[in-house]
Image (spheres, rainbow, N blue to C red):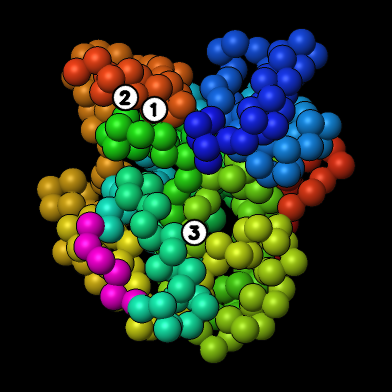
């Protein structure tokens, strides 16, 4: 959703929302949560354009951003670089979680209007997905007792938090600049090959907390969640997880078995999809697809490093500004009552 696609009433609500959050000092110029229209629209959409509910959600988000990690998300992001911290390789052996290139459907989709509703959903949304960053997670190697020999549970949680923050701070702005249009949502692929009930009980509290911060503090950033290699036990697991999610989030979830390759290639070109998921990308010479962080965001990081700059792209230009500048260039040539923090209880047995 962009400003151009809003109804007159929604545009008026956006302007009133902007004025009120600044007048009430919920938001300030330069806040890392973002002050552009695209950011404000995410909070409005998450609360169905209710001004009071949207303000409360943004207020809670701002409180969390100022307090998470003890001194706030900006300080935490400076302490833990989601793309380069000492324990990253060990973490990825257990629970890899990384951004990798972007969706790019370039050809007519293989499904027909006579296919099932779920396939119809994929067919309908795929045409809107070009340029969306892809987040990939593997749970099959999950072994928290072994992992916590190499990283503390608290730092592991903080690494999850900064990974989530990197989506709006770096990934979406860079994806927007690369696509030349406003990209405000990503795609998540979760591979459950080898994942069972024992591992689910280990990670249950972490997974629930992760979903909560995504919905509460980074609303409307997930365009689609594809769960692949779902085991037979997933029916039971999904029954536990589903109540954690907002109805709107559940509607974006597609649960697939082992015959997922065709579906993924309808959304992501083979050269952008890792070999392990049926694509052709290996990120050779860059540490492999999981550790490379490949995508426009990493290209920008490398460019800043060459130029000697340490500023992250999330503070440089927001997605709505990208869309506006491109347009100009073209013409000229889960609900909570209050803020929460998380102490994660992890079952290591």
- Residue behind mark 2: 326
Tell me whether the residue at label 2 lies in contact with that at label 1, contact meaning CB atoms closer than 8 angstroms: yes
| Residue at screen point 73% across, 20% down | 16
Question: Along the polypeptide, which appears first: circle 1 or circle 3?
Answer: 3
Q: Identify the disc placed on residue 323.
A: 1
Which residue is at the far front? 8
Few, some or many residues within 10 Å of mark 2 (<14, 14–19, 20+):
some
Residue visible at 36% across and 57% down?
A: 127
Q: Secondary structure at mark 2?
A: helix
- Asked if marks 2 and 3 touch (Cβ < 8 Å), the reply is no
Q: CA distance from mark 2 to mark 1?
A: 5 Å
- Is residue 212 or residue 144 the one in the foreground? 212
Q: Which mark is residue 224?
A: 3
The magenta segment: 106-111
Q: Residues within 10 Å of mark 3 (few under 14, many from 20)?
A: many
Residue drawn at x 38%, y 83% as measured from the top left: 258
Q: Secondary structure at mark 1?
A: helix
Nearer to me, 285 or 282 = 282
Q: Position of residue 292 (x, y in %)?
A: 26, 46
Residue 124: horizontal and vertical position, in percent?
44, 64
Name the image quarter holding residue 63. top right
Residue 149 at x, y percent in the picture: 51, 55
């Amino acid at each position: 959703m962009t400003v151009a696609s809003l109804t007159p009433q929604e545009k008026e609500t956006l302007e009133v929302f902007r004025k009120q959050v600044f007048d009430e000092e919920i938001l300030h110029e330069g806040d890392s949560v973002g002050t552009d229209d695209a950011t404000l629209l995410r909070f409005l959409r998450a609360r169905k354009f209710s001004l009071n509910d949207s303000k409360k959600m943004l207020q809670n988000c701002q409180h969390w951003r100022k307090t998470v990690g003890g001194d706030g998300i900006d300080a935490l992001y400076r302490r833990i670089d989601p793309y380069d911290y000492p324990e990253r390789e060990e973490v990825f052996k257990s629970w890899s979680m990384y951004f990798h290139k972007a969706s790019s459907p370039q050809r007519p989709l293989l499904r027909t209007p006579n296919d099932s509703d779920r396939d119809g959903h994929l067919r309908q949304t795929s045409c809107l997905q070009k340029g969306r960053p892809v987040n990939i997670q593997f749970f099959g190697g999950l072994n928290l007792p072994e992992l916590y020999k190499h990283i503390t549970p608290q730092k592991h949680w903080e690494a999850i938090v900064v990974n989530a923050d990197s989506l709006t701070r770096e990934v979406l702005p860079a994806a927007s600049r690369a696509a030349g249009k406003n990209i405000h949502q990503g795609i998540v692929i979760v591979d459950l090959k080898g994942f069972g009930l024992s591992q689910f009980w280990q990670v249950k509290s972490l997974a629930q907390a992760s979903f909560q911060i995504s919905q509460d503090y980074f609303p409307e950033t997930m365009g689609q969640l594809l769960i692949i290699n779902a085991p037979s036990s997933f029916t039971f697991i999904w029954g536990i997880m589903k109540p954690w999610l907002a109805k709107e989030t559940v509607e974006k979830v597609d649960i697939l078995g082992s015959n997922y390759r065709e579906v993924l290639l309808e959304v992501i070109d083979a050269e952008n999809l890792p070999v392990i998921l049926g694509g052709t990308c290996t990120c050779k010479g860059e540490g492999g697809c999981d550790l490379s962080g490949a995508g426009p965001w990493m290209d920008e990081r490398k460019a800043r490093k060459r130029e000697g700059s340490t500023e992250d792209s999330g503070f440089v230009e927001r997605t709505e500004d990208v869309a506006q500048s491109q347009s100009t260039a073209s013409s000229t040539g889960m609900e909570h009552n209050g803020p929460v923090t998380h102490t994660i209880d992890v079952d290591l047995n």
